[in-house]
Each structure stands twice: as structure tokens, then as C-alpha cells.
Image (cartoon, helix red, strand yellow):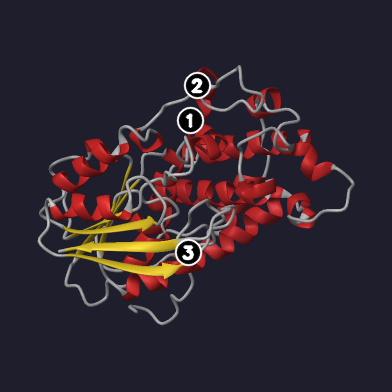
Amino acid sequence: MLKSEIVNLPTTRYVGSKQKIVSWIWHNLQDIKFHSFLDLFGGTGVVGYTAKIHGKKIIYNDLLKFNHIIGKAIIENNREKLLQEDIDYILKKGEGHYPNFIEKNFNDIYFTEDENRWLDVVITNISSMKNEYKKALALYCLFQSCIRKRPYNLFHRKNLYVRLANVKRGFGNKTTWDTPFETHFREFANELNSLIFDNKKDNLSLNYNALNFPESINADLVYIDTPYFSAHSNVGVDYRDFYHFLEGICNYENWEKYIDRKSKHQRLKKDKTPWEDKRKIVFAFDRIFKRFKESILVVSYRSGGIPTEQDMFSLLKKYKAQVEIIKRDYKYALSHNDGKELLFIAL
């Protein structure tokens, strides 16, 4: 550890998050010599943040804009924090006109009418901030607040009624759902400020499609945690669909033209990737392994997926002389299948 006080990790309720097993992942990497760490499918940033704690130069990358902003807030940012005056400015409605895009377009879908109005105000206030890191920090707090107030922590269907219904519940936490946005925001701001530290490296947060990652940017170790495609399913995990509302917040002024008006929950128009197509996924892995064949390759994976464990091993062996598979039992939230978490280390 670089600093004894940095012992916590970012809170996350993200599908497929490695938060609960990141210590296991790092335990298996700690004896490998490397200085720079590319988190190619960065997601919540917990793996990249752990590498930052251990003094590595981090290049965080994710195709989704809201994840890129998370990476900018907790990985690229080494110093900036949200001061009380920043938080007060963000949460207070000022003079003049405020847009009402969410209030107008997301009525009775995810949040109440008053909450939708609050979101329009806060997003507008954040967009007017001059400091890009403070803006990223504020958006991080807003993203986490939105997720926390959602049943299943997702935006995959129109189901505000689940939260509002006066019925006995076998899941979820209605008290958390009904806690005001402002309370959640302030709590996340306090948590986030405790996460910010300088590891004396020029870390980066990028927003590229991994299959078109710039040839000019490389790292000693490339960590790969792609969306998972179960062999028992005909569709892969679509993170953009799960979190489209957060992605929309990042493009607030142009959000309207990207909405799929045929969907009840006003998702974004589909933008399919190879990770959702079982006919293309093996080729996509091969392309990435070839691109980064000069680096140490570490792949987080699960048993029962496409490609199979043996196929993944064979793909890595095309480019690396030594491939090790480390396994442990693990079940993800919302998953109906028990399985093993796999870690491929290719040297």
C-alpha cells in the first residue's frame, strides 16, 4: 500500500463488478513484474483503482462514456475533491431557466416527477462547472445515487411501480429507494473524497472501443474483462442497455436524438458490439490478444461462457508461450448459475 489510509474501494452495484474478488485477482498478480497497467474494459474501475493503490501507472479505458467519467474521477484524478461549496452549488437551483428534459421524457419510468425535476437541475449545474475533474466527481456521485435508487440497480425496464407499490417485499430496500437524491449525493461525495489520492503517476482515463484502441498507447500488463456471453443464452450482456440512463446524462444536450422511442423505458438506440454476438466474439478476443501480444495478458472470465475455457486457453497460446488458469468458486448477483471465476495469466 502506498498510503495506509487508502484501504477502501469505490462502492459499486454494477452488474459483473469485481469488487468482491479484486483482492483475489491482485493476489495472483502481485509477483508479476510490471509498471504500467491497462484496464481495457474498465467498468466500475475497482480493478484499476486497486492497481493505482499499488503504485502502477494506470490507463483506464471503457467504451461507455459514463464509465470513462468514473475512471476520470477516481483514477486519472490525483488531487481534486468536492468541497462543501461545490456540493452546495451543485444541489441548489439557481436563477434563470432550467431545461426539463428528464421531467418531460421519463415521467413514471424510473423516478418520481419531483426527482426528475431535481435531476434536470443538478445535471445543468454540473455541466456549468469549469474544473473537469470536479465535474467528473460530481457526475460520479450522481451516477451512484441514480443506481442506488433503482430496483435491481438497473435501467432495463419501466418499473417505478415496483418501488412505489405498498406491498410486502422479498427483495430490495424501499427505505434506500425513497431516500432523497440529495442525501445520497452528499453521502457519495463524502465517500468519494476519501478515495482520492496521488500515486505519483500520470494516470489516464480513455473512452475507446477496445477493438480500435490506439496503436500508440501500450502497457506492460493488459487486464481484459469483457462482457460475458453465457453458453446457455442467445444474447450477451448489454451494459449500455442496462445503464443507458447514465449514458444519456453524459450527453444531456443531445440525449433526445439517441432515444429509441419504440421502447417503453426510453432506452438508447441499439449499438450492438461483437461481445453480444456469439458468431463474432471469438474473433474479437483473438483480435485483442493479437493487438496486445507484446504485453502480459490477464483475462477475467467465467466458466460456462463463449468461448469455452479450452478455446480461451488456445487463443492465448497463439500469442503467448506461457498460459496459466487460476480458478475459484464465485456467484454473481442476479446470476442464476453457479460457476467458477477464471483468471487467465499469459506471459
Q: Tell which residue pokes out farthest to the bottom in this image.
A: 4
Left or right of 275 on screen, residue 140: right
Q: Give the side of residue 125 with respect to residue 289, left or right.
A: right
Q: Residue at x 42, y 26 (%)?
A: 271
Could you say where residue 43 lies in the image, as x and y percent from the top left?
A: 42, 50
- Reading the chain from its start, which is encountered first: label 1 or label 3? 3
- Circle on res. 251: 1
Q: Is residue 131 visible?
A: no
Q: CA distance from mark 1 to mark 2?
A: 9 Å
Q: Quadrant of the C terminus?
A: bottom left
What residue would you read off at disc 2?
258
User: Neighbour class for label 3 at 10 Å: few (<14), some, many (≥20)?
Assistant: some
Residue that numbered label 3 is attached to: 19
Percent coordinates x, y for residue 4 in the rendering: 41, 82
The answer to whether residue 249 is above or below residue 182 is above
Which comes sooner in the sequence, label 2 or label 3? 3
In the shown orientation, is residue 253 left or right of residue 95? left
Q: Quadrant of residue 38?
A: bottom left
